[in-house]
Amino acid sequence: MTNLYDRHSALLARAAEALRTRVFWTPFPEVPSGKIYGESAMADGTAAFEALVGNAFDIPGHPETRRVGRENAPWGKSLSISYPSADPATLIAASIKAADRWASADPETRSGILLEALTRLNAMSFLIGHATMHATGQAFPMAFQAGGPHAQDRGLEAVAAAFAEMTRSAAAATWEKPQGKREPITLEKRWRIVPRGISLMIGCQTFPNWNGYPGLFASLATGNTLIVKPHPGAILPLALTVKVLREVLAEEGFSPDVVLLAADEPGAEITKTLVEAGVFSIIDYTGSSVFAAWLRQNAGSALVFTEESGVNSITITGTDDFAGMCDNIAFSLSLYSGQMCTSPQNLYLPQGGIETNEGHKSFDDVVGGIVAAVDRLLEDGTQASSICGAIASPATFERIEKARHAGRVVRESRETGLGASATPLLVVSGEHEDGPWNHECFGPVSFFIACADAHAAIARAAAIAREKGAITAALYATDGALIDEAATAFARAGVNLSVNLTGNIYVNQSAAFSDYHVTGANPSGNASLTDTAFVAPRFRRVMIRWPKAA
């Protein structure tokens, strides 16, 4: 057994410092460059990916009774990879058998193993990028970042946060209570970190690693064993992760079954069967509010951490850079065809228009400026494809079609020419109060909503965040009093707010070590990545004490 904690302790310390200060930092470069990852990294990653396509994915020693695998092909390239699968009872039994030794390991040992796995995964980022691209429909630059370095940042963040919580107080103490003239009472005390048990991570289709790594690494760091249940349409990115973790565990003398893969197929999902077994102490889930509600009703005593549906908004009350605002919004609406949990959906603005650096703009002027910016951004098919990517689920096309009838279409959704694609559909909402804009319409659909004035626009955007949930909100304003009003309204709605973004930073983006992703304070999720409440409940401290000998 090697001392992986010593090998990676400086990395862990630097991550902890970044968490404390919330400044920019990453050990995992986000640029897919041969100068950073090695001149042959791109070619090697591509070759490694192609070698997996059409073959059986090998996870040495993994429980297996059959092979499964029918992943998505949003870019038209079928993966046709089969994965080892076993019934839930077999996976649960293997996880229980591996639990005691992993639970007994100290925080340093567990953290060292996880940090080693993360560094190995980082070296595989080109392979993971291709896997993420062809499973999710992301264009390669986004897939490289979201499946690779950015996800690895989130995993490291979880390990650092968990380590800080586990080592926050002393593991041993000599306790002495004075008794006046009598001898003091003296006790030796020791505290042991005790994990909650078996954890289940239920992956999502669009960002399997980015959304999955926080819960995955937090549970493992705190001593829980883990079963990884990928979305049946996006297995490969998490299968690669499981394989690397199992390799490091085995090298360090632990059972690789500390981490298991629960792969399944569309129409034959095993998620509910796993949950209904009633053995899980922790469940991490990203997906629809409908299934999240089912989880809460059927998970028994398990801690359930969720990221769910929401309605993200942009409120426009004024700007001193109209062109920059339109361009920024256009990119936010187009990125990955609105298939991000942070993508804006509703745009609220005064029906009388706004004041800008270009003079007064009517409601229709603002709408037209944003529509024109989207058209300019996506006029070249190759660029449109690299920004919009491909559609991960056929259900998204159904939502686009339904939204066409919700109001006045000011920009029609179009194909980019590559993959199963759709550019943004932009609609001015209808006059009736209820419509698809009052619910999450996941995908490349956004609604312009006229409000009585700026105050009403802020109030409506904050209200829908409070009632339906939201992960992001954006505001454009030149009036400091309006910004203060919005800051209070959105804080009370429990949603993070970005103000006057016009440059190369977008409301969709969330930075590890600095941004708390989701607040847990509205219906879009009950957890925040990665705060104390996300990691600390995954373990408990148990004490043993005895009188100290004289």
Image (cartoon, rainbow, N blue to C red):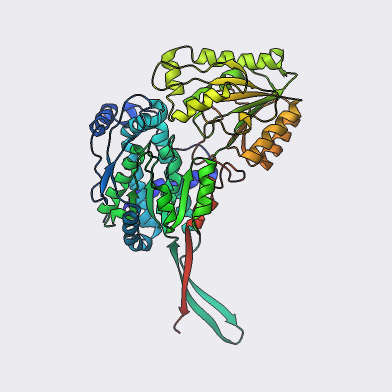
Is 397 rendered above or below residue 487? above
Determine if residue 530 is in view: no
Is 394 rendered above or below residue 262? above
Total numbered badges shown on the rendered structure: 0
Q: Quadrant of the N terminus?
A: bottom left
Q: Quadrant of the C terminus?
A: bottom left
Which residue is at the front of the view, 433 or 460? 433
Decide if residue 237 is on the left or right side of residue 295.
Answer: left
**Which image quarter: residue 329?**
top right
Direction front: furthest residue: 267
- Residue 454, given in percent of the width and then of the height, sits at 74, 26
Decide if residue 474 is on the left or right side of residue 213.
Answer: right
Which residue is at the front of the view, 293 or 323? 293
Is 175 rendered above or below residue 244? below
Is 242 rendered above or below residue 445? below
- Residue 445, given in percent of the width and then of the height, sits at 55, 25
Decide if residue 245 is on the left or right side of residue 473.
Answer: left
Determine if residue 515 is in view: yes
- Residue 504, given in percent of the width and then of the height, sits at 53, 24
Question: Which residue appears at 71% of the width and 15% of the height?
Answer: 362
Direction bottom: furthest residue: 182
**Which image quarter: residue 205?**
top left
**Which image quarter: residue 118?**
top left
Question: Which residue appears at 27% of the width and 36% of the height?
Answer: 81
Decide if residue 420 is on the left or right side of residue 346.
Answer: left
- Residue 115, given in percent of the width and then of the height, sits at 36, 47
